Structure formats: C-alpha cells, structure tokens
Amino acid sequence: MRPVLNGSTTTWRIAILFEARCESGTNKYFSGIRTSFGRKYVEYGGGIREFYNLSTNTDPHEVSNTYNVTKPPTRLAARLQALKVCAGDSCRTAENGP
C-alpha cells in the first residue's frame, strides 16, 4: 500500500506487532498481528487463539472470534512469529509477509 501525498509516494506500515506480558514466568501473555487489510490474529499463553476480520463492519467490537482450529490463518501466524524475533531491516520483510 503506497499512498501518494503531495506528489510523492509514501510507504506506510502494513502490519504491526502487539504484545503484553502480565506476570513473568506465567502463561499470562499475548502477542498478535494487525494488518492494514483488516486482519487481526492473537495468540495467548496457554494456547488460546483469536482471529478477526476487521475489514467488515459486522463485528467492530471483536465479539465473534472466527479462529478455526482446522483451518488456522497460517500466513498470519508465520508473520507474527517473524515479527517477534526480527531486528533492524529484517522487520520490514517480516511485516510484509511471504
């Protein structure tokens, strides 16, 4: 996604990593990825997963978790793992995904 502002092309982020750890040494943490295309995937300690399609206005408060264990969002999961360990320029590659 490259919007044009004042005649010049600007590169915008297309995905972000978010994470938090509540208590050190426990499984009370989460990490997730949110894309500019309206996808949000979250992994919680203990194995819980969530997946939301935010590009539609049918679930703006993320009430309906659409994660399907038989058909997980493998590309988003891979991007999330790459973002968690990237550094420097490799983060742009991880952000853009495969």
Image: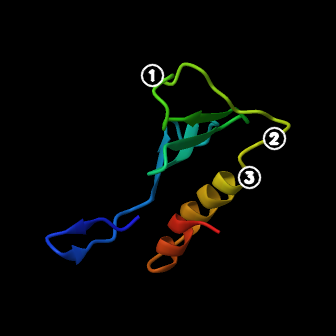
Q: Residue at x 60, y 56 (%)?
A: 80
Q: Residue at x 52, y 78 (%)?
A: 90
10 shown above or below 63: below
State the SS at label 1: loop
Separation of residues labelled 3 and 2 (CA atoms): 8 Å
Task: Specify the farthest residue to the top.
Answer: 63
| Snapshot quadrant of residue 4 | bottom left
Residue in the foreground of this view, choosing between 89 and 10: 10
- Can you say which quadrant of the picture contains the N terminus? bottom left
Task: Specify the farthest residue to the bottom.
Answer: 89
Residue in the foreground of this view, choosing between 16 and 11: 11
Q: Earlier in the sequence, mark 2 or mark 1?
A: 1
How is colour applied across the structure in the image? Answer: rainbow
Judging by the rendered image, the residue that carries numbered circle 3 is 74
| Type of the residue with mark 1 | His
State the SS at label 2: loop
71 shown above or below 91: above
Separation of residues labelled 3 and 1 (CA atoms): 23 Å
Disc 2 and disc 1 in contact, CB within 8 angstroms: no
Judging by the rendered image, the residue that carries numbered circle 1 is 61
Q: Is the residue marked by circle 3 packed among few (<14), some (14-19), or many (20+) residues within 10 Å?
A: few
Q: Residue at x 49, y 32 (%)?
A: 56
Percent x, y for residue 81?
64, 59
* Rendered image: mark on residue 71: 2
